[in-house]
Amino acid sequence: MRCSICGIEIDSIDEAIEGGWVPYFYDGETDHEFVCPGCSEVFLESGEDGEMEVKAEYRGKITYKDEGERKEHWVMGIMVR
Ligand SMILES: [Zn+2]
């Protein structure tokens, strides 16, 4: 799996859990998967309902790796045609 903020990769879920990775979090209305401990410490905080969410000052300002991947696939689809 891959950190959706910095793109660092980790091999196993066990390692991620032991390492303190966050399995999912919210940026406003959007949810994202997996963030490494380094990024979660900088960008995330625990919200009122106990879910991890992006700190107010970073909301909507982070370019997510998971979104970037989707765009790359889309561009490749155009080039194939
Ligand atoms: Zn990260």
Image (tube, grey):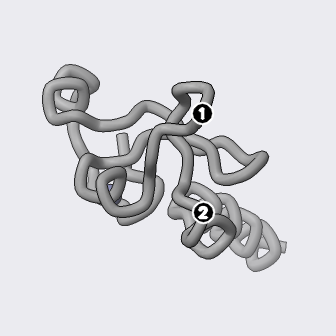
* Picture layout, residue 75 above or below residue 31: below
Tell me the CA gap for discs 2 and 1. Answer: 13 Å
Image vertical order of residue 81 relative to residue 18, above or below: below
Residue depicted at x 21% and y 36%: 11
Q: Nearer the viewer, residue 23 or 80?
A: 23
Q: Quadrant of the N terminus?
A: top left
Does residue 26 appear to the left or right of 74 in the view shown?
left
Does any atom of ligand 1 lie closer than 8 Å to the CB of label 1? no
Q: Which residue is mark 1?
A: 48
Is residue 80 found left or right of 23 in the rendered image? right
Q: Nearer the viewer, residue 7 or 37?
A: 37
Please, what secondary structure does the residue beneath circle 1 have? loop
For this orientation, the residue located farthest to the bottom is: 79
Q: Position of residue 79 (x, y in %)?
A: 75, 79
Q: How many marks?
A: 2
Q: 22 above or below 76? A: above
The part of the image, by quadrant, that contains residue 25 is top right
Q: Position of residue 56 (x, y in %)?
A: 60, 63
Query: Mark 2 belongs to which amino acid?
Result: Ala
Give the residue at mark 2: 56
Label 2 or label 1, whichever comes before in sequence order:
1
The foreground one among 36 and 76 is: 36
Q: Quadrant of ligand 1?
A: bottom left
- The picture quadrant where one finds residue 20 is top left
The amino acid marked with disc number 1 is Glu
In the rendered structure, find residue 67 and report the number of the disc placed on it: none
Q: Are marks 2 and 1 in contact (CB under 8 Å)?
A: no
